[in-house]
Amino acid sequence: MIINFFAEYMKGNNLGKIANAHLVQADRSLKLALDERCLYLAEQHSIEVDFPKTGISGTLREEDRTREYPDFMEKEDTLSTYESQSILGKLYRKTKDIQFSVFNSEEFNEVVAVNVDKELIEPGFESQYMIADANYKAYARDMRVLLKQFGIQSEAELVSGSINELSKFHTVKKDKDDILERIQKSLTLLVQKHRKLFERNLTEDIRTKRASAYYIVAYDVNRQYSAQGMRFESKAKLEARKIENLKKNEENKKAKSKQEQQFFSFPWLIAGKYLCRIKQRNNRAHN
């Protein structure tokens, strides 16, 4: 009886097909997930999920069967795809563009100059700068260990989960899905560790200032700010410093190593919600 039940379940299992049909219909309809066919498919999906308990299978009507997939579903086994105009499709293509530029850059591990966003500067961040700098260095060490452990080439690959190539040791020992899960767990533990360092016994006001300091130590490559008396330089001085630093960067370009790799994920993974609040507040003030 158990064998017959299992065979019947495997024969009529439509869970994946119903889910795919729901996603495609929601992508195509102006009503999104509130489309009548989507509501029907959602109900059938719920029934199908309970099949092992109830013995009742969900129904996938012929008109609901998927024959053409949006590009973001990456159905490489079918020729029938279309360019989705939904937010999922737009995000998918934008991400693919970024992924391509990261993986095809010979210099993605180089130190690069970036502009510090003034709207992420919190008054009083100076008091937290030294702590932020020390914590950034600890974070960078942990990230390098993780990158080396799994043979991952860049921070972008590690944080996004879109890994171009794993070390041969890991691909031989276990399948890729298992390794990716281990990588994600390792990154999660790393982030949790550093969030505890960030939030420990601090008031909201101090956390906000520290978040801003975290951002600065990660993004202020040219060190426009010092631990004491930090402030934005005048425009003329800033332009002069930029020219000076560009020259220095060119001179030192060959000497830079992966040990100097920047970790832009530091402020966002550890203190992202505080940075978003700072940005929103300052943006509203300027508007």
Image (tube, grey):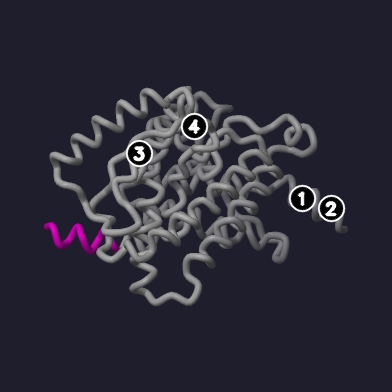
Sort mark 2 into few (<14), some (14-19) or many (20+) by Cα contacts within 10 Å.
few
Which-is-in-front pick, marks 4 and 1?
Answer: 4
Tag 4–tag 3 contact (CB < 8 Å): no
Which residue is drawn at the image coordinates 50% and 33% (left, top)? 67
Residue 110, percent across and down? 45, 30
Q: Which residue is mark 2?
A: 4
Q: CA distance from mark 2 to mark 4?
A: 56 Å
Residue 153, percent across and down? 57, 33
Callout 3, which amino acid? Lys
Callout 4, which amino acid? Asn
- Which of the 4 quarters of the picture holds residue 247? top left
Lateral position of residue 138 relative to residue 168, left or right: left
Which is more N-terminal, label 3 or label 4?
A: 3
Which is more N-terminal, label 4 or label 2?
A: 2
Which is more N-terminal, label 1 or label 4?
A: 1
Q: How many marks?
A: 4
Residue 286 magenta? yes
Secondary structure beneath dot 3 equals helix
Q: Which residue is mark 1?
A: 8
Q: Which residue is mark 3?
A: 90
Q: CA distance from mark 4 to mark 1?
A: 53 Å
Residue 99, percent across and down? 46, 32
Q: Nearer the viewer, residue 18 or 101?
A: 101
Sort mark 4 into few (<14), some (14-19) or many (20+) by Cα contacts within 10 Å.
many
Callout 1, which amino acid? Glu
Tag 1–tag 2 contact (CB < 8 Å): yes
> Which residues make up the magenta segment?
278-287
Q: Which residue is mark 4?
A: 109
Q: Nearer the viewer, residue 16 or 106?
A: 106
